Image: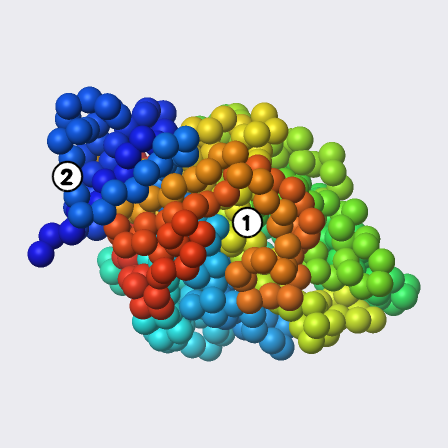
Amino acid sequence: MSSRTVIRGGLVITASDEIHADVLIEDGRVAALAASGTPAAEAFAAERTIDATGKYVIPGGVDAHTHMELPFGGTFASDTFETGTRAAAWGGTTTIVDFAVQSVGHSLREGLDAWHAKAEGNCAIDYGFHMIVSDVNQETLKEMDLLVEEGVTSFKQFMAYPGVFYSDDGQILRAMQRSAENGGLIMMHAENGIAIDVLVEQALARGETDPRYHGEVRKALLEAEATHRAIKLAQVAGAPLYVVHVSAMEAVAELARARDDGLNVFGETCPQYLFLSTDNLAEPDFEGSKYVCSTPLRPKEHQAKLWQGLRTNDLQVVSTDHCPFCFVGQKELGRGDFSKIPNGLPGVENRMDLLHQAVVDGHISRRRWIEIACATPARMFGMYPKKGTIAPGADADIVIYDPNAEQVMSAETHHMNVDYSAYEGKRTTGRVETVLSRGEPVITEREYTGRAGHGVYTPRSTCQYLN
């Protein structure tokens, strides 16, 4: 039995077009689009009709950077794959790419299998995996080839967190050389972790223990230096590079220079760097701990350069780096020592709305909103046009979005499994109304109608921005 749905009367927005069109969905995929009111559109017949008059019809968001159930700092991210993907759906995101972790002394396969076990049967929306490479050796390098073949086509390395995830320049170079051969994409956490550890030790010795010092020791210059070094190593290896969670204007300048030189270098930023700042880290009574993440929040003047980077395409993607820890019992582990505060912010539910607010505020256009939140992450990580657009043959991952609804972000009303909101009290214009994942309603007129296990694992092809 085939099932059909038609979405009528909305403004369909993709990265390339805006058109008043009706959308016909058949068996979980987009079957056809036709201009609203035309005979072709009138001929669409379906069991279910969704009225999108006065609303936007947009592709489901693709969040290419989440950490569900991540072990960190002696605890675990508070969202499971079940709670985290449900919250993502509430926020208009229909695909996440999470990070499977290789532990030192273990194989990539062990890490990937462990993450498959966490996610399988629990997700409300579709998901894929990147692989965190913590232990580069000959066996790991061979495994990278196998993972690319089976649809895990991106590998994350860390220039930060010595003793945990850290890779030295030699290990990074070897992994980049391998990815240059197998078509994989290296994702880099670019901060000089060795130097940062010195500054942490010195700050604590001076009695500087409050959360705001987390931002002061993780200096913008050390993000820029690591970004520059990662670019040069990638250039030596002949490999593409994707720098995650870019927060500092100096790092944006390094990316812009590399791209001007014609290198395959890409950059991602996150809503927290666009909307929050060191003012939040400095909030009294340990409230600043809620905003501890790495790379850290920067002084407000960095925001303008990040928005500029998004407009000029020196930054291509906005992901969340969603990695929530509750204030009570988790962030509090760092009372008296900022270096023990688990690093991470909740945000998977807020991204699409915050970026729509950026449209309202004039930072970006509507099509650029869809480009940086849906189409480009899908292309970057080998899922386009199955994900990231509304076109015949694409998965029917579609959001009916009310551009005029107003909301106030709050922990009282969000669906992430965390006891605070990083955007508490923020007023935004625009809100998700209905969400379809492969044609199935997950959110129906602001009610959750999805289920754990609907979301399926999505193997990916290689980065579609490379020759």
Residue at the disc numbered 2: 45
Amino acid carrying mark 1 in the image: Asn
Q: Is residue 203 visible?
A: no
Distance from Cα at disc 2 to Cα at disc 1: 35 Å
Residue 117 pos. (x, y %): 36, 75
What crowding class fits label 1: few (fewer than 14 Cα within 10 Å), some (14-19), or many (20 or more)?
many
Amino acid carrying mark 2 in the image: Ala
Residue 437 pos. (x, y %): 31, 52
Q: Name the residue: 74% across, 34% down.
A: 301
Front residue (pair 26, 174): 26
Name, please, the residue furthest toward the right: 206
Mark 2 or mark 1: name the one nearer the start of the chain.
2
Residue 186 pos. (x, y %): 43, 51
Residue at the disc numbered 1: 350
Q: Name the residue: 28% across, 38% down.
A: 7
Q: In the visual, does 51 lie left or right of 260?
A: left
Q: In the visual, does 171 lie left or right of 116?
A: right
Say what secondary structure mark 1 lies in.
Answer: loop
The colour scheme is rainbow
